[in-house]
Amino acid sequence: MSSKILAVDTATENCSVALLVGSEVIARCEFAPREHTTKILPMVDEVLAEADLRLTQLDALAFGRGPGSFTGVRIGIGIAQGLAFGADLPMVGVSTLAAMSQGSYRLHQACHTLAAIDARMGEIYWGQYQRQQDGDWHVLGEEAVLRPERVEQRLISVQDTRWFTAGTGWQTYQEQLQALTVEKQAGTVLYPEAQDMAWLAQFALQRGEAVDAEHASPVYLRDEVTWKKLPGRE
């Protein structure tokens, strides 16, 4: 795979951009709650300048499709669509949970992950992932939003497997999740990063999953989101 892919993500408290050119990656990442709109485009400019590339020279634009913060996911997809429209690039949405799994492999060589993002309202965004021989990731079961005490019912057993944990859900709901009856090892990945999304986007491109910018869509997992409950939006 030798694609040139720009990835952007603002789905969580992290704000990150990465440019993947063949096997080389140029990345920027910053923990910046509520500052995504001011941080993301300068990061894009920086990585493109460092690689001496223009948007129109790229093969695709990847974005964090969620799950995550409703506002953060919308900011990310909106910025990504604007960039893609301007450069006539196809878009690839990448799961934030899968990205944290790839981050766990990058940092810990983990091949089996339990990814949990704090979804507020007493729930987590959950995904159980297994790395494939080609370097892509396969979700066991489905990604879901659920209460942490219900995770045990969704676990898929893989014999003699140690699972690396990833995501903020493990800190927020430590007692409930640590009680899971599988062998676990604490990982250091708390948030998704664009450099891992760029890596995963290569596989999505190979599978023909790229779409035109106007068809790019988020994945919230929740059927109802907070903004619908605001006054005048019921």
Image (cartoon, rainbow, N blue to C red):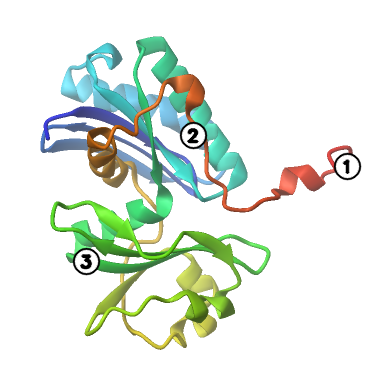
Q: Is residue 210 left or right of residue 205?
A: right
* Residue 56: percent from left, percent from top: 28, 12
Give the crowd class for mark 2: few <14, some 14-19, many >=20 residues within 10 Å: many
Which quarter of the picture shows residue 102?
A: bottom left
User: Residue at the spot x=40%, y=88% of the render?
Assistant: 181
Label 2 sits on a secondary structure element that is helix
What's the distance in space between the residues labelled 2 and 3, CA to CA?
28 Å
Which residue is labeled 3 in the image? Answer: 111
Which residue is labeled 2 in the image? Answer: 76
What's the distance in space between the residues labelled 1 and 2, CA to CA?
25 Å
Which-is-in-front pick, marks 2 and 3?
3
What's the distance in space between the residues labelled 1 and 3, CA to CA?
45 Å
Give the crowd class for mark 3: few <14, some 14-19, many >=20 residues within 10 Å: many
User: Residue at the spot x=17%, y=17% of the render?
Assistant: 52
User: Please, which residue is most extreme toward the right here?
Assistant: 232
Q: What residue type is labelled 3?
A: Cys
Q: In this view, does 209 lie to the left or right of 167?
A: left
* Residue 203: percent from left, percent from top: 23, 41
Foreground pick, 230 / 158:
158
